[in-house]
Image: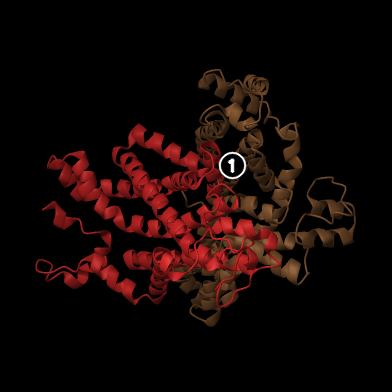
Amino acid sequence: MVKTEHKPELSNEQEPLNQNDKQTKAISPWKDAFKQLRRNRLAITGFIIIFIFLMMGILAPFLTDFTYKEQMLTDRLTPPNSQYWLGTDDLGRDIFTRIAYGARISLAVGFFAIVGALVFGSLLGIIAGYFGKWVDMLISRIFDILLAFPSILLAIAVVAILGSSLQNALIAISIINIPIFGRLVRSKVISLREEEYILAAKAQGLKHGRIIFHHILPNSLAPIIVQATLGFGTAILEAAALGFLGLGASEPDPEWGKMLSDSQAYIQLAPWTLIFPGVSIMLVVLGFNLIGDGLRDALDPRMKN
Amino acid sequence: MLSYTVRRLLILIPVLLGMTIITFSIVHLIPGNPAQVILGESATDQQIQNLEETMGINEPYVKQYWIYLTDLLQGDLGTSLKTKSEVVSEIGPKLAATAELTFFAMLFAIIVGVNAGIVSAWKQNSWFDILAMVVALIGVSMPVFWLALMEKWFFAQELGWLPSGGRESSRDPIEPITHFFVIDSILHGDMERLVTTLKHLVLPSVALGTIPMAIIARMTRSSMLEVMKSDYIRTIRAKGSGQIIVIYKHALRNATIPVLTVIGLQTGVLLGGAILTETIFSWPGIGRYVYDAITFRDYPVIQSGILVIAFIFVMINLIVDLLYAYIDPRIKY
């Protein structure tokens, strides 16, 4: 009963069309969004970019004859050629191989950091928004404090506390993204809390948990998905920045940001050591941004320009 | 306005306290023995004990935090483990260097970003719009440190047009008055030096300003498009006002509000990005100061550096919020 009421808000767009046959058939807003997304060329480009890097990461062992830590000391700083597609670095390691294995690191860090932030952020946001009063006050102030730091700085602070390693960099990136999801979900929950169907659910005597997970959360999903997609990109940039500062991955991990910082001194002698890892970071982030923008247009028609 | 200002200031208190708790944790919550971690493997027991005493590590956390807080309020930001001098006295000139850099970066970002956004909105779907938005999209996807490295390589090392790092030519250092070298050169009445100073500023400011520029351009475009559709703009058009007047006098004013928020938020990105940019261009600002401190495990400097940057960020956001209410009196809180 209640469930049929709570189609995600974007269905408003569809309603005038379906008013007559509402009972018989309603186009799922998710299907509609998916259709729109498929028509969005930029978003498709984004998907293709991410797919290529994902495949590069997964198939890395089959794509090259080298390993990411193998040093060909006689071939140090070789420019790109048929043997070393993207050249070699100062220790004679094949850059293409390192970028392919690095895709694993960057995508995994982005994914786990954002999933972590999403879970904890949404949970806190829901609690704050749903229960209000002092709980909201407390959680919102914590978000304020976390957001008071420029994000990379907070990440540095967290890594300074935990010690520098790839794993701690991931935790740090996750933490700095928590308030972003938290605030988003909180404001969404507050606006939904007053909706009639929630009141109806409460009147039926449903438990808080059921109302939250079955009625509020599904309706907050659209903005969370958009934010998460855009967040992947930012998280990858942040991981690269931490790696660049020496606060992330350690030798011989082929993390892209670290590759850039290791090759800084050879910029004039061997620019390819810096160009390709940088381009990889940029492309992956661009890919997620394109998908995120496309999703936002598809899921939230009001945002479209 | 007044009650809003007061309320906005009151919210600051828990935020500032929370910030100090986080920076306090940097040193005091290091797992294991903080003194040992700070001094490294080779430290003698005596050294560790001395540091423990100065840091008050064996006291309960609450007391440690209280000591930290009272020290802060008295303007004591700790002592650098590396240089043995007070952080307060070291940080001033560095802040000036960073302020100068971020100012020029923001100037670049706002001038280019706002105008590109306006023209894009004005000539929607033209080649300029498409080009500008592609550049903006790439701009937001680029790691700032990579852009900085590429600029340094191309414009400083390959072409040799601009200096590759620092704030001034090392053979002829400036005598600082305000530590803002642009102002100092003007005060000295030395035009040649002013040109040198500005030349040193170009690459780091452009690198640092690119991401905010891209974001500001996208924001300006979308908020201009929104405003241009509104009734009052149609009325002004119907009255026969020229396009320039419509855009710059009427539309821009209402489109400024979201842009202003973005500018406030981007200043934070700039301050964070300064750590990376300053490291690459050997810019002697607070970002590089913190970076060097990380390398030397100079915890008091990391701690205070982060606190000072975050404090500035919070203050900038305060100013932006107040400006926001001032520019648009319709906003009620």
Which sits in the foreground, B79 or B21?
Answer: B79
* Residue at image location 57% in from the left, 42% down from the top: B314
Residue B44 picture quarter? top right
* Residue at image location 43% in from the left, 55% down from the top: A110
Q: Chain of mark 1?
A: B
For the C terminus of chain B, which image quadrant? top left
**Applied colour scheme:** by chain
Q: Is residue A11 visible?
A: yes
Left or right of B276? Residue B160 is right
Left or right of B186? Residue A287 is left
- Circle 1 Cα neighbour tier, 10 Å, few/some/many (<14 / 14–19 / ≥20): many
Q: Is residue B110 visible?
A: no
The correct choice, above or below, for A163 with respect to B67 in the image is: below
The correct choice, above or below, for A176 with respect to B50 in the image is: below
The chain coloured brown in the image: B
Q: Secondary structure at mark 1?
A: helix
Q: Residue A93: give x, y in percent of width and height.
A: 57, 63
Q: Residue A50: give x, y in percent of width and height.
A: 41, 67
Residue A9 picture quarter? bottom left
Q: Residue A114: give x, y in percent of width and height.
A: 40, 52
Left or right of B140? Residue A31 is left
- Which residue in the protein does label 1 denote? B310
Q: Amino acid at mark 1?
A: Ala
* Residue at image location 54% in from the left, 74% down from the top: A85
Residue B52 picture quarter? top right
The chain coloured red in the image: A
Which sits in the foreground, A162 or B233?
Answer: A162
> Farthest residue toward the bottom?
B127
